[in-house]
Amino acid sequence: MSFVDTFFNSDVMISAFPQLLRGLWMTIALGVVSILIGVTGGLIVSLVRLYAPKPLQLLMIAYIDIMRAMPMLVVLILIYYALPFVGISFSAWWSAIIGFSIVLAAYSAEVFRSGIESVPRGQFEAAAALGIPFLITLYKVVLPQAVRIVIPPTTSNCVSMFKDTSLASTVALPELLKEGQNAQGFYANPSPLIMAAVIYVILLWPMVRLVSVLEKKFKGERAR
């Protein structure tokens, strides 16, 4: 069998495309939901980390450090395969969502913390001198500035999150990679896996370029 027939078999790719398309929609849904929960959770964690009472701050620091140190694959395996031993069971979908979200929240929390701390402290003091409540100062003054700073690294984290969705195959979730593996086994040909890899590139390359554009844009704005 020739190289083309082995890795780029058009008949196999056409036959496997509907199966890969189902996996693609699952990948997109998994990534979008995990990002929404993870980024929102990261903002909340960062605010607790910065402004809550000391015991809660220490708890958030421990959470952030542990989640950033633990491989995503290990988190997924613990949630899906280990928790049932203590009577806590989640479906493959929710195991993946929970795993991706709690890890992304830890990374997002550090990004938000860095962005908030980059806002000059004098703005808090000026708002307090004007009698503006702390929460309003945070919402109206600090967070809008911090968000502009954290957009590029947050977008980069989102790209990584989409790539990590391929690990959901370890909990038997039929996302793009899993469907590619199933199609490879069914057709006894690696062409579906090559096609899945191409789909990942088509999906994620614009996001990768967006990160670079945003970094240049906000770097230029800060330089002015």
Image (cartoon, grey):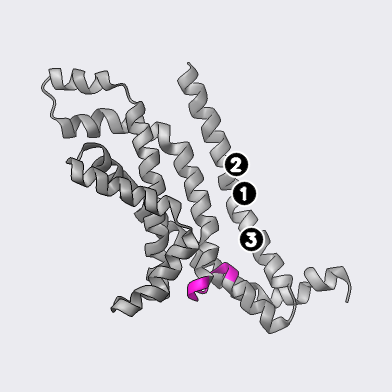
Foreground residue among 1 and 50:
50
The amino acid beneath tag 2 is Arg
Q: Are marks 3 and 2 in contact (CB under 8 Å)?
A: no
Indicate whether 144 appears above or below 30. above
Dot 1: what SS? helix
Report whether 93 appears left or right of 53. right
Q: Residues within 10 Å of mark 1 (few under 14, many from 20)?
A: few
Q: Secondary structure at mark 2?
A: helix
Q: Is residue 114 above or below residue 207?
A: above
| Alpha-carbon span between mark 2 and mark 1 | 6 Å
The mark nearer the N terminus, 3 or 1, is: 3
**What residue did someone put label 2 on?**
209
**Magenta-colored stretch includes residue 149:** no
Residue 109 found in image quarter: top left
The residue under label 1 is 205
Q: Nearer the viewer, residue 28 or 76?
A: 76
Vertically, is 118 above or below 58? above
Q: Which residues are magenta?
A: 170-177
Q: Position of residue 1 (x, y in %)?
A: 88, 77
The answer to which of 180 and 95 lies nearer the viewer is: 95
Residue type at mark 1 is Trp
**Left or right placement of residue 95 versus residue 197 in this view:** left
**Numbered circle sitting on residue 199:** 3
Amino acid under disc 3: Ile
